[in-house]
Image (spheres, rainbow, N blue to C red):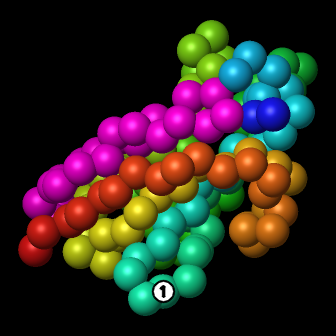
Amino acid sequence: QVQLVESGGGLVQAGGSLRLSCATSGRTFSVYAMGWFRQAPGKEREFVAVISIRDDSLRDDNTYYADSVKGRFTISRDNAKNTVYLQMNSLKSEDTALYYCAAGRYGVVANAYAYWGQGTQVTVSS
C-alpha cells in the first residue's frame, strides 16, 4: 500500500508563491510516476503536473504540465527524502483548489493513478 501525505497549502495573495510537498514511502518513486491534480469547488479534478518514474540512468526526469500552469509551476523530487514537490509561483485566484498528490502511471488523466493523498488546500486571494 502506497501512502501519500501532502502538506504546504495555505492562504496566499495573488502573485505570491507556495511550495507543496508530498511525502511517501521508500520504493514509490522507483515504481510509480508522481502527479499533482487539483479540484476547485463545483469543478472536476484536473491535471496539474507529472514527473516520471525514478530512473537513475537518466540525467533528468521527464515532466509535463497543464497549459494553465506551465511556466509558473515546477514539479520536482527529492529521492533521499522520498518527497515530491510542487513549487507554485505567480499564483492567481484561479489556482485556488484542493491539491492532490497521486502515484501511478505517467499520464494526465486521474484514472491513470492508483494512489491518492488526502489533499491540501490552496487559497489565492486577489
Indicate the quadrant containing the N terminus: top left, top right, bottom left or bottom right.
top right
Above or below for 104 versus 27 = below
Q: In the figure, is residue 22 to the left or right of 24?
A: left
User: In x, y percent, where is residue 106?
Assistant: 82, 54
Say whether residue 29 is magenta. no
Question: Is residue 63 in view from this perspective?
Answer: no
Above or below for 79 versus 30 = above
Toward the viewer: 61 or 40?
40
Above or below for 55 versus 48 = above
The residue under label 1 is 43
Q: Residue furthest bottom?
A: 42
What is the three-letter code of the residue carrying label 1? Lys
User: In x, y percent, where is residue 88?
Assistant: 36, 51
User: In x, y percent, where is residue 97?
Assistant: 37, 68
User: In x, y percent, where is residue 116?
Assistant: 66, 51
Q: In the figure, is residue 40 to the left or right of 117?
A: left
Q: Which residues are magenta?
A: 3-24
